[in-house]
Image (spheres, grey):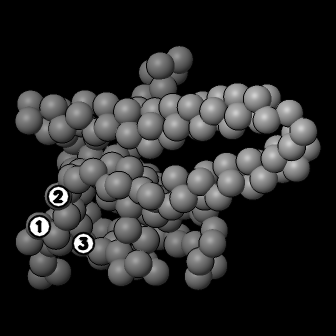
Amino acid sequence: MQVYKFSYNYNISFFLSLFFIMIFIIMVMAFFFSADKKILKLLIMIIFVGMFSFVVYSLYIHPFSNYRKIKKAIENNEILYVSGEVTEFKTPSLKWGNHESESFKINDIEFEYLENESYGYARIVKNKGIINKNGQKLKIGYYEEYEYYDKSKPSRRVIVSIEILNSD
């Protein structure tokens, strides 16, 4: 039974934190540059344009281009599969507010993901994740991403499908 299929996840928490940081920066600048309104307006405009450009690129353009690349690999049957039991399962120890990753192995192939990934499976145990303990029998479909400077080993294995196998 297939329980996960590749999707794109919109992550808004990073954008909200940048928004609050921008408000703080503007308040500090207003305090220091209150005498010269033209400089203050110019600085505020530069910060907004710069932050907006950064947010759009980092949250949407870059992750979405990777998503499209993997989607094309799925359509061209270039996805790798592994079946077996989950071993060496590790989940973050904190209940919230951390940036630890969850990881596990199937047949010595290691998978690791954060809960805020933009594409691919990223649901950790505390958020009712499908993969939640050692011994689960799964079939994982995955795509190997490589850094442009190092093609010798994958920098990330993006989970594109999860199928729960019967434990007969």
As measured in the structure, the alpha-carbon distance from the residue carrying label 3 to the one carrying label 2 is 17 Å
Residue 66 position in % (x across, y down): 33, 34
Q: Which residue is mark 2?
A: 5
Quarter of the figure with residue 122: bottom left
Nearer the observer: mark 3 or 1; the answer is 1
First-in-chain label (3 vs 2): 2
SS at mark 3 in the image = strand
SS at mark 2 in the image = strand
* Residue 156 visible in rendering: no
- Side of 68 where 18 appears, left or right: right
Of residues 125 and 68, the one drawn nearer to the viewer in this rendering? 68
Quadrant where the C terminus sits is: bottom left
Query: Residue 38, labelled with which disc?
Result: none
Q: Which residue is mark 3?
A: 137
Nearer the observer: mark 1 or 2; the answer is 2
First-in-chain label (3 vs 1): 1
| Crowd around label 1: few <14 · some 14–19 · many ≥20 (10 Å) | few
Amino acid at pointer 3: Lys
As measured in the structure, the alpha-carbon distance from the residue carrying label 3 to the one carrying label 1 is 12 Å
| Crowd around label 2: few <14 · some 14–19 · many ≥20 (10 Å) | few
Q: Which residue is mark 1?
A: 2
